[in-house]
Image: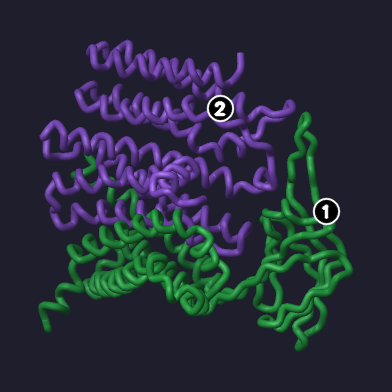
Chain colours: A purple, B green
Amino acid sequence: MEFAHIQILSTLLYCTSLLCWLLKRFRVVVVLIVCGLIANVLALAMRGFIDSHFYLALVAEDEIYVLPAVLAGIALYHVTRRAKLDGVFVLAPLVLTSLFVILSPSEPGLPSAKINIWVAPTFFLIETLSAGLIFASAGLSLGALLLHKGHKNTLTDRYILVAFVLFSISQILGALWAYSGWSYPFSWSNRHLASASVWCLYAALIHSHLVGMRPKTAAIIASLGALPMLLVIYHHQLAPLLLAAIGHPS
Amino acid sequence: MKRIWKLFYSTHLAIWLLCLASLSLFVGSIVSIVYEAELKKLNFMSFIQWIEEFGSQPQIYWWIGAVFIILALLALNTLLCTWASIRRGQVGRKAGSILLHLAFLVILSAHGISEISGASQSVIIQPGVTKEVAWAGLTIVPAKIEKYTQQIGARTARMGMMAELSVHDKTSQWKPLRPATLKPAFAHGLSFHLSLFDKDLEKSQARLIIRRDCSRSLFISGAVLALAGIVFYVPSILRRKQYQG
């Protein structure tokens, strides 16, 4: 069985878990997410196994492939902590990111000089972890707005805080890596600019409690955080789409 | 006047500026998809040199002006708020927060200095061929270039490279250097990086990036301050009611 088949199995399990959530079969949801996560991690491990060697760096740099596993972990934590209606807003990003992986497959890369330094894989792993938390908090905030709850919950606030801290650490590591590889810590590229945009938005959110910002406003800001984060993670896929949409020659 | 001054001390202003900075950077990230090649040149040029070249194309850089103004105001706001915390004697209680704000200011200053005074050039080096880098007053004599590969099935993985070179800046003695991929070498106030991109080059050639950036130590100080700030800040903020279940 190839890793692509296991990846499809994992996506199917995640999709079924969302279906079971809608049918209010919460225990089955937990079982399905656990099984999906096991399949997902197995697929990732197989992706990093090349020529009888395992390369963690290769797995880590495939952020698109790691993201569903991170979101599955968050969804599992979320649904086991509180089986309320808002769990669906964590499961939705999980299903979407997982579907994206099987709809836009890519061959695993080859090992490169990156495997010899710890900064690159650590940067990718921490950034993906924070991306998962940002998508989860964006989903939950959007859910709060849609359900007219008008407020975020404690878990969303925790996700935002942890996401901000992890994202800040990843940006420091990323700057270190970019400096050693390309000679500059910040590049004027869409990925780096979108990262700076995410950081500023989440810094604003972290300050929001100091001024007693209206929960609805905070929820709108948290939901919007997903937009630049999409560009950070999916820039290779989104950039050609945007260029095609505006009829750019390249 | 007093009201304007008070406004600069406010957290409300910080939140608005951060949201505006986020918006303008997001717009910038979209613009940079369309004008990728033009904006990437900014990585190797100071902003002043870059604007001389692209000044006639405001569609590329209009948002950079907005980012610079917003970040300058944000820096002033951060400085005043941090100073107010220190003056109120909250250094102990708000140590993490103060360290994080200082880190932000230091890193922002480093970026500013780098954009204004940074200079770099990419040169193709080959053993035995001497290169002159005029702006740095440097002579580079490459002695050896080694490229490492690994055969994986039918594919060849490029595992980086290493160069042995001597550099001389006319005022000092020859200095031997051994930069490698992702492991830069330092001499004469410059850093020497072997580029990861060498697909268009011959086997005996490598692309060497020479950079002068006096803000390097500022970046490192900012990063250390930020990490220390996080260590102090997270435990203190988690005790707040907002994060308790």
Residue picked out by circle 2: A44
Foreground: B180 or B45? B45
B245 above or below A75? below
Q: Which mark is residue B203?
A: 1
Residue ID at (77%, 87%): B170
The answer to whether residue B108 is seen in the rendering is yes
Residue type, mark 2 in image: Leu
Residue type, mark 1 in image: Lys
Q: Quadrant of the C terminus of chain B?
A: top left
Helix, strand or loop status at disc 2: helix
Chain of the residue displaying label 1: B
Q: Quadrant of residue A2?
A: top right
Q: Quadrant of the N terminus of chain B?
A: bottom left
* Residue B9, percent from left and from top: 20, 72
Residue ID at (58%, 21%): A3
A237 above or below B78? above
Count of numbered circles on the image: 2
Helix, strand or loop status at disc 1: loop
Q: Which mark is residue B86?
A: none
Chain of the residue displaying label 2: A
Q: Is residue B193 left or right of residue B11?
A: right
Q: Alpha-carbon neighbours of circle 1 within 10 Å: few (<14), some, or many (≥20)?
A: few
Q: Quadrant of residue A244?
A: top left
* Residue A116, percent from left and from top: 69, 46
